[in-house]
Image (spheres, rainbow, N blue to C red):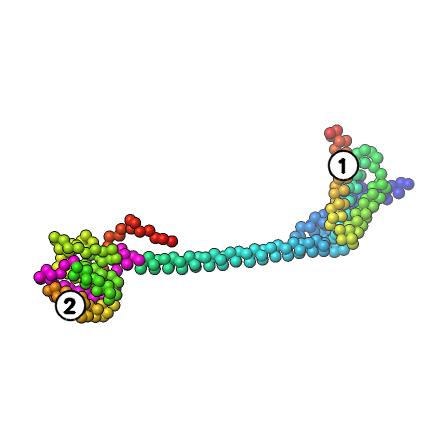
Amino acid sequence: MRERTLMLKLVVAVLVGGLAFAILVQTRDNNDDDFSNVRSDELVELLKALDAANQRLGKQITDLTRTRDSLLDTNQRTKAATDAARERADALAILAGTVPVVGPGITISIQDPGGGVDAAGLLDAVEELRNAGAETIVINGTARVVGRTYVIDDDEGIRVDGRVVKAPYVIEAIGNPSTLAEGSRIRGGLVDTLQKRGASVRISESDRITVTALADSKAPEYARAES
Amino acid sequence: MIPVVGLVVGVALGLWFQPEVPETLRPYLPIAIIAALDAVVGALRALGERRFDDRVFVVSFTSNVLIAAFMVFLGDQLGVGSQLSTGVVVVLGIRIFANAAAIRRRIFHA
């Protein structure tokens, strides 16, 4: 009986020692962070979760790529529209005479010792130049001629858009120089008409004419764009 | 006294050899440890209540370890290994807490 008790005590000691041993071994083993002690079905779950996440992220990439592409496309279209609008604005500004202009053209110097050139004569000359394709016309370097320009006789001389111009007149026109010169010299044209009024006309072609005079820009009071 | 010597020897052996857990035992060892802990805490309680019996301890210790390992094995075979492991750990944990509470009440009367 005494031996039996001692035996049991020894077994208890072995068991307790075995437990302590196992705990130490297990805690040490658990510190290696790998998947070696993960069961296979857990691994499968992990793999599935990773797969799902992968797919979701792939879809996200596709979506975001599409969004980026469409944004880029919009951006380009906006840029094209802006460029077109700017070109149009430039053309209209030249027409309205609100910006300085440079380009090839002709200079017409009119000596008028007899005073035979009046508003009608000057307007005729301008019309002739327009017919010949002048894109910008300026008289005496100060009066820019645009669509709304008026020309009237005045006590002090000729009034173009409120600005007095006096002889000798210098008309500068931007356009194709040879066409403008030919158009002016044509029989019954600008030169003929002015010479009949007793003026002497000299035409010189130029590769570069700079027009710095601006027309007064005035917002239309009655006309409205219909759209 | 002898069990304390066994404890010290076990710790010393673990620290001395630092062995790797064999591949076949890997799934069972953690659960077996929890089951053994349950038996040890139960033994401590019995010790406090002065009704500790070596034989009962040996039997409950071994049977706890074997049953726990067997349940994990069975769960792995059935494909519910992780769930069953969790269940075993929960049940053993509850038992450990209950025994610890009894010990606490006896010692601190609270």
Q: Nearer the viewer, residue B62 or A195?
A: A195
Q: Is residue A46 left or right of residue A162?
A: right
Would residue A218 be visible to someone looking at this image? yes
Check disc 2 and report the residue beneath it.
A192
Using the rendered view, name the quadrant where residue A142 is placed: bottom left
Region rendered in magenta: A92-119
Pick out the residue farthest to the left. Answer: A114
Report x, y in % for residue A223: 31, 51
Q: Nearer the viewer, residue A115 or A48?
A: A115
Check disc 1 and report the residue beneath it.
B98
Mark 1 belongs to which subunit?
A: B
Q: Nearer the viewer, residue A7 or A179?
A: A179
Q: Is residue B103 left or right of residue A91?
A: right
What residue sits 42% from the left and 57% below the top? A78
Report x, y in % for residue A168: 13, 61
Say what secondary structure mark 2 lies in.
Answer: helix
